[in-house]
Image: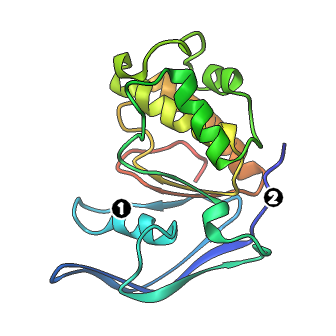
């Protein structure tokens, strides 16, 4: 199923303040469908805060975020946000974790077993998520991108804790998302092999 292409996610004159510290101000950006937008910089400069602002999870101190060509659906219904925390519930099985997200975000993508196969967790669905390694938990979190199709992916250090094989898997489905006209914004310290 193809992702509906959004033309652009735009940030205009964005500013972010944490307490008394100004992290950034006067920031303009445009993220276009089909082209990754990578956010880089030293720790503590506001990369994660910027992503949360773009995802609609945090209000900007100044400026606006808007979509062009987005239709009537609100931003919250068009964004997948994958933050530092994997949002994995240790007491639930792998299947139950992913089934929950599929029900909440919309059943518009792959089935739970197919998504687990895609991220390299096939056959682990009955395990409690608490026994997974850090890399496996990250792959489970990434499987949310596949069970519910959304046109905007906002990802904070998406390949953290992933081995080389898992990084290649991520790059494959991220490139497919971009090829369908999807928007991908990622804060990263590592190359993502997205053809950028």
Placement of 9 over or under 158, stated as above or below: below
Query: Relative to residue 76, is residue 2 depicted above or below?
Result: above
The N terminus sits in image quarter: top right
The picture places residue 150, in percent across and down from the top left corner, at: 69, 53
Given the current orientation, which residue lies at the most extreme left position?
20
Nearest to the observer: residue 80 or residue 156: 80
Q: Residue at x 61, y 23 (%)?
A: 116
What separation in Å lies between label 2 and label 1 (alpha carbons)? 26 Å
The reply to whether residue 163 is in sight is no
Element on which disc 1 rests: helix
Q: Quadrant of residue 39?
A: bottom left
Q: Residues within 10 Å of mark 2 (few under 14, many from 20)?
A: some
First-in-chain label (2 vs 1): 2
Residue beneath disc 1 = 48
How many residues crowd around disc 1 within 10 Å: few (fewer than 14), some, or many (20 or more)?
many
Q: Is residue 49 left or right of residue 155?
A: left
How many marks overall?
Answer: 2
**Residue drawn where x is 81% and y is 58% of the image:** 4
42 sits to left or right of 153: left
Is label 2 in a helix, a strand or a loop?
loop
Image height of 3 relative to 28, above or below: above
Residue 30, visible in the rendered structure: yes
Nearest to the observer: residue 130 or residue 175: 130
Q: Residue at x 83, y 48 (%)?
A: 2
Residue 118 occupies quadrant:
top right
Task: State the residue lying farthest toward the right.
Answer: 1
Q: Position of residue 143 (x, y in %)?
A: 58, 34
Q: Which residue is mark 2?
A: 4
The colour style of the image is rainbow
Disc on res. 75: none
């Amino acid at each position: 199923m193809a992702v509906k292409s959004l033309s652009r996610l735009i940030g205009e004159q964005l500013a972010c303040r944490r307490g008394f510290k100004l992290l950034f101000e006067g920031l303009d950006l445009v993220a276009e469908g089909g082209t990754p937008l990578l956010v880089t910089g030293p720790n503590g400069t506001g990369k994660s805060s910027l992503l949360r602002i773009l995802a609609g999870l945090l209000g900007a101190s100044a400026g606006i975020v808007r979509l062009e060509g987005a239709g009537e659906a609100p931003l919250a219904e068009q964004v997948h946000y994958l933050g530092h925390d994997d949002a994995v519930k240790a007491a639930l099985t792998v299947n139950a974790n992913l089934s929950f997200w599929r029900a909440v975000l919309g059943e518009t993508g792959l089935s739970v077993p197919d998504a687990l196969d895609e991220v390299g967790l096939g056959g682990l669905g009955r395990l409690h998520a608490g026994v997974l390694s850090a890399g496996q938990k990250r792959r489970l979190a990434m499987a949310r991108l596949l069970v519910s199709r959304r046109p905007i992916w906002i990802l904070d250090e998406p390949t953290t804790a992933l081995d080389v094989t898992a990084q290649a898997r991520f790059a494959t489905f991220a490139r497919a998302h971009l090829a369908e006209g999807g928007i991908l914004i990622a804060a990263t310290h590592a190359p993502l092999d997205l053809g950028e």
